[in-house]
Image (cartoon, rainbow, N blue to C red):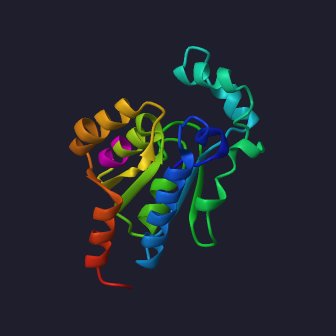
Amino acid sequence: MDFQHAVLGILDDPEALLERTSLAIELFRRHSGVVVVVRAAFLDEDFDAIPPRSNMASIMSGSGRAMHDDSDLTIVHESVAPRPGDIVVRKTRFSAFSTTDLDTQLRQLNIDTLVLAGISTSGGVLSTTLDAFDRDYLVYVLKDACGDPDNDVHDFLITKILPEKSHVASLDEFETLLMELPET
């Protein structure tokens, strides 16, 4: 989630995160996993619909229209960019579910287990995990394929909060889990 040029800029070392995430995606593809690419991007009407009292309004006021759907800053980094057959959704809130048809698309494919990676752990990852948990998905969070501008916040969420609603795993643990599954 949110591996876009504008969002990558909030991290100290986005290249390392991109490398780990790209590896996770390739492992998942080899095991016939459905890859979902989620990007935050706004149309004019999306900007206009944000009430001034909303926390989202204050967040968006700092970026101006940099997060507009047609901005190069909202393009997903090429190392984790979607491929034909991937599900792609554009969101306007933190959760990948709240302003998209993602739940409908996943249900149509009988998908009930999610593996999450993204930026930021305290934003999109946390919100999507909680939302997915509430929708009865089995959720895995790849702790070393998530990033946050505050490493202490990332560590706290990964060790204290997210394990309450998901299975938190490292990329190595994820690879082992996938190896135990039959190839399809």
59 and 46: which one is in front? 59
Q: Which residue is painted at 66% across and 39% down in the image?
A: 6
Q: Is residue 27 above or below residue 125?
A: below
Tell me residue 102's x, y (percent): 50, 54
Q: Which residues are magenta?
A: 130-134
Question: Is 57 colored magenta in this rendering?
Answer: no
Can residue 137 be seen here? no
Residue 70 vs residue 137: left or right?
A: right
Q: Is residue 154 above or below residue 82?
A: above
Q: Nearer the viewer, residue 59 or 155?
A: 155
In the image, is residue 56 above or below residue 72? above
| Residue visible at 38% across and 69% down in the picture | 110
Q: Quadrant of the C terminus?
A: bottom left
Residue furthest toward the top?
53
Looking at the image, is 155 positioned above or below residue 82?
Answer: above
Measuring from the top left, give residue 166's x and y in whole percent.
27, 49
Front one among 4 and 103 = 4
- All told, the count of numbered labels is 0
Q: Please give left or right for residue 17 compared with residue 63 in the image.
A: left
Between 117 and 17, the one lying in front of the other is 17
Question: Residue at the spot x=49%, y=46% of the render?
Answer: 96
Q: Is residue 133 magenta?
A: yes
Looking at the magenta stretch, what is its main secondary structure? Answer: helix
Q: Quadrant of residue 160?
A: top left
Q: Position of residue 98 (x, y in %)?
A: 48, 41
Q: Seen in the image, is 46 located left or right of residue 151?
A: right
Q: Residue at x 51, y 52 (%)?
A: 16
Which x, y percent locates residue 158? 30, 41
Q: Is residue 76 left or right of residue 44?
A: left
Query: Is residue 5 at least partly visible in the picture?
Result: yes
